[in-house]
Amino acid sequence: MNDDSHETKGLTRRDFIRVGATGAMGVALSGMGELTVSAAETPGLLPRRRYGRTGLEISTLVGAYDWSPAVIPLAVKSGVNYWHKGHRWTSETMPEAIKSQPRESYYLEITVDRVGGDHMKGRIDEEQHYQFVKEAVARSGAGYYDVFKFHFGYHSLNEAKTDMGMVRAYERLKKEGLVKHLAISQHHYNNIGGDMAYDIVTYLIEHSPYEAAQFFYTYGDKQELEEVLALAKKKDFGTIAMKTMGGVGRASTDKKFQTLLAEPRFSGSTPGAAMVKWLMSNPNLTAAVIATNNFDQLQENFNAARQSTMSSSDRQTLGLLAAYNKGLTCLLCADCVSHCPEHIAIADILRYERYALDYHELSRARAEYRTLTKDGSACIACGDCMPACKADINIVAKLKEVHHLLG
């Protein structure tokens, strides 16, 4: 079956291209129930929300440089106007669907990493960050990046308070017109004696020039993250959720799960669509970045993102997914990590498992796993971490499984 004959709920890729975003998405959403749409939104396009202090109005689903090239034109037509890690494109490789638009109509993000090592052992270096962005701007031909994002973030509250190298690099670049806004992608660092992402982001919201943050967030996550989102909304601080689809990919290939999902009470819902609706129903969240590799994923996510309310079937589907994930899928809360006497980056290891089993990106997962100073084989099977796991995962056994898969 070729792409043009591939239909999902009556909408084909040809429909997207032929009638454009408004008409195509209108077709896709017909018969899907009542929608809650603000008067400011264009019918058929993805809704947009204010990205905090940046003042940018960004699509509630943001794109990424590693999306399948086949879906990017469709995403643009459907209203995606923000591109995560946009600096990975050069002037030659940037998709024509993006660069053919007026420059002010889309937003490119550049993520800036530590130097001299990975996100655990590298350092912040003002001059090298400054030069990295200057060189990326020259390669891209884009003129500037809308958002300068500190990738992986600070190790601790103390580092966030005292090391201003990343901020100074941003300020120099902003004066030259090469970047416009400052954001951060924050991870947990309790495995190296640092702090949790939600503690660091809370500080940045209250006491820093950062305007927005990206962090792990999914269904069933910790109350601390809900509190961060509420504070961010109050303080006009932008938020993007990442790693949202825990368990969705592996559930889609699990025959037992799919048999359960076929029951009438789940009718009209899927785990992926229900998760997107759950994200979009939170008024405190600006947007989400979700891996999108094919037309079916794009259509399912975009149709769901156009709705701000969840059906009873959606809620039951998320409950089914949560039960499926129990004991199986890490939610990346990292509570277990501080209990490990070997200081193994358990949450990172289980994040790489997600790449392999949920995103079906085994090569990427193995490449990331090889960068670890201590991998799953360093586990001494003491079990100290296991009481901290709210997902009831047998972490000792899981680390062995993941090492067998990725090692």
Image (cartoon, helix red, strand yellow):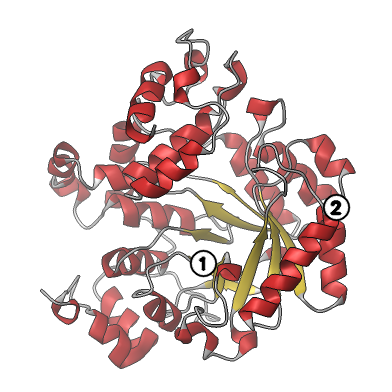
Q: Mark 1 points at which residue?
A: 60
N-terminal-most mark, 2 or 1 = 1
Identify the residue at horizontal 48%, vertical 43% (top origin).
Answer: 368
The amino acid at mark 1 is: Thr
| SS class, disc 1 | loop
**Disc 2 element:** helix
**Residue at position x 59%, y 43% from top?**
226
**Residue at the top extreme of this rendering:** 382
The answer to whether 343 is drawn above or below residue 32 in the figure is above
Q: On the picture, is 320 further left or further right than 108? A: left
Left or right position of 285 against 297: right
- The Cα–Cα distance between marks 2 and 1, rounded to whole angstroms, is 31 Å
Residue highlighted by disc 2 = 165
* Frontmost residue, 399 versus 275: 399
- Given residues 219 and 330, the one toward you in this image is 330
* Residue mark closest to the camera, 2 vs 1: 2
The quadrant in which residue 8 appears is bottom left
Q: Measured from the top left, where is residue 397 in percent x and y? A: 36, 18
Q: Mark 1 packing: few (<14 Cα in 10 Å), some, or many (20+)?
A: many
In this rendering, does residue 55 appear at all?
no
Crowding near the residue tagged with mark 2, few <14, some 14–19, many ≥20 C-alpha atoms within 10 Å: some
Q: Where is residue 229 shown, x and y percent of the image?
A: 63, 49
